[in-house]
Image (spheres, rainbow, N blue to C red):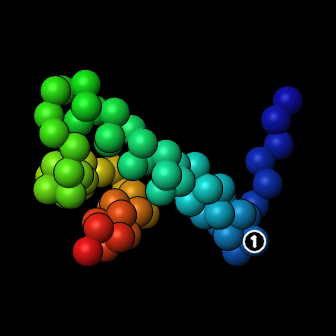
Amino acid sequence: MQHRLPVTGVSKDVSSFFSRASLPSQQETLGVVVVEILRAGRTLNRKALCKSLIERMSHVSSPQEEEHLQELLRLLF
């Protein structure tokens, strides 16, 4: 038998923390993007990185993920 606990402000805060923590680090995301570019046989440069990050932004599922990608774009300039 399962008991449901009432949702409190603390529960929401903890849930929010873990949902943010599930985002990959900046290094992990850039690593994945770099591998995608190289496997596609494209030249690795700032323009290719920017293009890939912008393409990823059009497929994000959360505002946190979009902010994560925007931060990576800011690092390139």
> Label 1, on which residue?
10
At x 47%, y 56%, the residue is 26
Can residue 8 be spotted in the picture? no
Above or below, 14 relative to 60: below
Is 51 or 22 nearer to us in this picture? 51
Q: Closest to the observer: 14 or 68?
A: 68
Query: Which residue is more in the foreground, 22 or 3?
Result: 22
- Whether residue 72 is situated above or below residue 22 in the rendered picture: below
Q: Taking 67 as reference, is 47 left or right?
A: left
Q: Measured along the vertical axis of the image, is residue 71 above or below residue 40?
A: below
Q: Amino acid at mark 1?
A: Val
- Secondary element type, mark 1: helix
Rendered residue at 61%/56% (across/down): 21
Q: Quadrant of the C terminus?
A: bottom left
For the image, the number of numbered tags is 1
Image x and y of residue 27, in percent: 49, 52
Q: Residues within 10 Å of mark 1 (few under 14, many from 20)?
A: few
**Observer-nearest residue: 76 or 2?**
76
The location of residue 50, given as percent across then percent down, is 19, 57
Q: Quadrant of the N terminus?
A: top right
In the figure, is residue 71 to the left or right of 9? left
In the displayed structure, does residue 4 sit left or right of residue 54? right
Q: Residue at x 32, y 40 (%)?
A: 34
Query: Residue 32 lies in what quarter of the image?
Result: top left
